[in-house]
Image: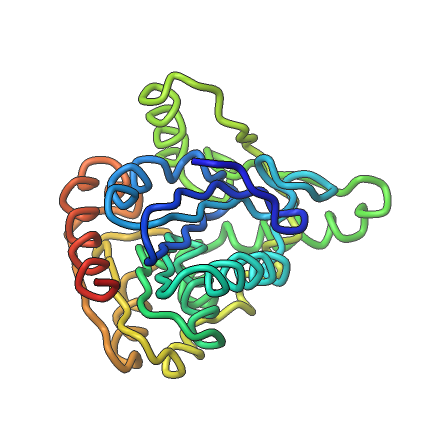
């Protein structure tokens, strides 16, 4: 894959035909963690993988800042590039970006969307976090107060992080598989906790005109399945794969099964 820059966004492009899949990573991740999917999809389609600003190899200061608004802007920039070059475009997003692709598809003309264990409703996510959400909200306000002086960071994953320790297992699995350093850091600014309850892609899904493939983990403690099924019911043309597993199992133990099904969906809707 060749490197390209779209403004401050660093992307990899694999040119393989007139149909393109644009792929964005989840909460605090980097595009190297998409390589298992890219290897499978890239045999049949062109690909665009990118890092959000402030992460990975993209520009943006301060580093490790998660901003919903900026990430949506980055998606729009990459999708506009894909639309200008390829005949058909599909969006692939997982977890946090699983919500982003629904948001983008409600605004842009694309041929298909894959929304994997998606963040569809911030209120549902906060409810699933329980009392931890109060702690992160307090830290978010502290971060805002301290932002002129550097801010306050918290772990992305782990005992005191936004996400459980399985996330770290996923990072280590990628390092082992590809025998390379991944430009990933286990920290982000706490202020994102203040945006999470306000971000609700579920309110836009009825505006998505193309087919949407939802991958649902029924035992998902990160992005609750109940909210995803509600998004499915509001989507004009939805295809669903539901598994009795947890959020991170779809990336690991169920990777082959789920990615094969996603590939079938892409072939059906991109030709």
Is residue 1 placed above or below 147 in the rendered structure?
Answer: above
Q: How is the image coloured?
A: rainbow
- At 35% from the left edge and 62% from the top edge, which residue is drawn? 90
Q: How far across and down, in percent of the image, does residue 206 sit?
A: 37, 83
Q: How far across and down, in percent of the image, does residue 15 sit?
A: 39, 45
On the rendered structure, is 64 left or right of 176?
right
Classify residue 225 by image quadrant.
Answer: bottom left
Classify residue 22 by image quadrant.
Answer: bottom left
On the rendered structure, is 209 left or right of 30?
left
- At 39% from the left edge and 58% from the top edge, which residue is drawn? 98
- At 42% from the left edge and 71% from the top edge, which residue is drawn? 105
Instruction: Name the image quarter holding the N terminus.
Output: top left
Is residue 137 placed above or below 122 in the rendered structure?
Answer: above
Q: How far across and down, in percent of the image, does residue 122 sit?
A: 47, 65
- At 47% from the left edge and 74% from the top edge, which residue is drawn? 108
Foreground residue among 40 and 95? 40
Foreground residue among 132 and 163? 163
């Amino acid at each position: 894959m060749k490197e390209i820059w779209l403004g401050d966004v660093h992307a990899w492009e694999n040119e393989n035909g007139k149909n393109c899949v644009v792929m964005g990573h989840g909460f605090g991740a980097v595009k190297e963690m998409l390589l298992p999917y890219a290897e499978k999809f890239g045999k049949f389609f062109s690909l665009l993988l990118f890092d959000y600003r402030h992460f990975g190899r993209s520009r943006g200061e301060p580093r490790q800042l998660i901003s919903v608004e900026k990430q949506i802007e980055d998606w729009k920039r990459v999708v506009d590039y894909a639309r200008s070059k390829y005949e058909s475009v599909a969006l692939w997003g997982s977890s946090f970006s699983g919500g982003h692709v629904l948001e983008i598809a409600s605004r842009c003309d694309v041929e298909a969307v894959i929304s994997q264990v998606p963040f569809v409703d911030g209120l549902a996510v906060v409810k699933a976090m329980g009392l931890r959400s109060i702690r992160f909200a307090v830290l978010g306000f502290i971060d805002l107060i301290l932002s002129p002086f550097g801010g306050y960071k918290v772990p992305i994953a782990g005992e005191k992080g936004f996400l459980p320790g399985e996330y770290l297992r996923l990072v280590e699995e990628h390092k082992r598989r590809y025998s390379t350093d991944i430009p990933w850091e286990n920290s982000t600014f706490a202020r994102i906790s203040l945006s999470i309850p306000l971000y609700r892609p579920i309110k836009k899904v009825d505006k998505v005109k193309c087919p949407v493939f939802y991958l649902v983990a029924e035992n998902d403690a990160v992005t609750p399945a109940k909210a995803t099924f509600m998004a499915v019911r509001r989507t004009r043309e939805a295809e669903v794969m539901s598994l009795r597993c947890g959020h991170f199992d779809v990336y690991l133990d169920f990777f082959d099964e789920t990615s094969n099904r996603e590939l079938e969906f892409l072939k059906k809707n991109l030709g």
